[in-house]
């Protein structure tokens, strides 16, 4: 990688390693945490753990691809000839991003028709967002291709944001008072952490980044966003499930 320093390489390497550890621990926590909630919320926690498990698997593959793509020889980063596979990250997002929205819908315990409708529309919009962003990511440069496909991917993204704040507003108000604030916080964390992805995606257009620095900002930035959007968000889903279980058990 032209212009990449050993420090930049190691920062990305360590970020991937931290992501692996975080997602592995989160998966165990969420799946074991199913015993702490009543039956209505076990599926939500199963999906939450599935999200972090998928992320764990793909971060292992991303880590292996990064390790195979570069070597450090006498303090200098050199390409091995094996390309770093960015597709792993997009396959991960294609699977996990719709599931993140579905786990929020499941933990809200809406009516069956609302659950199916919101899961299909929001999950479909999330998948479309990822598919539209991929061609720009793999275009191989900071050019109009990346800019156009990134702009197109923002259309379903903005629809998701609108739905979370307007379409689900009334449903959030129906949540138990003890959990309502956590549901709103989970929604806000989803939106704020997801806004970080386009910030990273478009960062090379607005910041004087190139070569190794551009790669470092993109890969570390995406990793931070993933940990926030999946592991931290998952903790909020767990807390909502526990809080709602306590409220419902208290009224039984």
Image (spheres, helix red, strand yellow):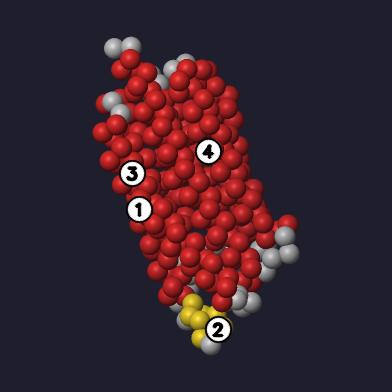
Residue indicated by mark 4 = 190
Label 4 crowd bin: few (<14), some (14–19), many (20+), radius 10 Å: many
Is there a contact, CB below 8 Å, between mark 2 and mark 1?
no
- Could you tell me residue 146's position as x and y percent? 63, 58
Residue indicated by mark 1 = 24
- Could you tell me residue 196's position as x and y percent? 60, 48
Mark 3–mark 2 Cα distance, whole angstroms, equals: 39 Å
Q: Tag 2, which secondary structure?
A: loop
- Residue 73 vertical placement versus 168 (above, below): below
Screen quadrant of the C terminus: top left
Label 3 crowd bin: few (<14), some (14–19), many (20+), radius 10 Å: some
Q: Tag 3, which secondary structure?
A: helix
Residue indicated by mark 2 = 75
Mark 4–mark 2 Cα distance, whole angstroms, equals: 40 Å
Q: Nearer the viewer, residue 2 or 56?
A: 56
Tell me if residue 221 can be seen: yes
Screen quadrant of the N terminus: bottom right
Q: Which quarter of the figure has residue 32?
A: top left
Residue indicated by mark 3 = 29
For the point 50% across and 46% down, the residue is 228
Q: Nearer the viewer, residue 123 or 107?
A: 107
Q: Earlier in the sequence, mark 4 or mark 2?
A: 2
Q: Earlier in the sequence, mark 2 or mark 1?
A: 1
């Amino acid at each position: 990688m032209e212009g990449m320093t050993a420090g930049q390489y190691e920062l990305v390497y360590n970020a991937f390693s931290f992501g692996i550890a975080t997602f592995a621990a989160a998966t165990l926590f969420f799946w074991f945490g199913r015993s702490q909630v009543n039956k209505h919320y076990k599926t939500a926690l199963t999906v939450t753990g599935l999200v972090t498990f998928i992320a764990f698997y793909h971060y292992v593959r991303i880590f292996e691809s990064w390790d195979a793509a570069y070597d450090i020889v006498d303090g200098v980063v050199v390409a091995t000839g094996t390309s770093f596979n960015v597709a792993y990250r997009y396959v991960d997002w294609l699977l996990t991003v719709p599931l993140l929205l579905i786990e929020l819908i499941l933990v809200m315990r809406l009516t069956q028709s609302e659950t199916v409708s919101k899961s299909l529309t929001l999950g479909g919009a999330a998948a479309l967002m990822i598919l539209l962003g991929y061609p720009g990511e793999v275009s191989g440069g900071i050019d109009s291709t990346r800019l156009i496909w990134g702009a197109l991917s923002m259309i379903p993204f903005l629809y998701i944001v609108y739905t979370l704040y307007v379409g689900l507003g009334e449903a959030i108000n129906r949540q138990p008072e003890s959990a309502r604030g956590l549901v709103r916080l989970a929604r806000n964390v989803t939106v704020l952490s997801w806004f970080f992805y386009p910030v990273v995606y478009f960062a090379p257009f607005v910041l004087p980044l190139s070569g190794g620095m551009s790669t470092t900002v993109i890969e570390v930035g995406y990793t931070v966003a993933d940990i926030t959007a999946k592991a931290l968000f998952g903790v909020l889903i767990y807390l909502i499930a526990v809080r709602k279980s306590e409220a419902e058990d208290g009224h039984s």
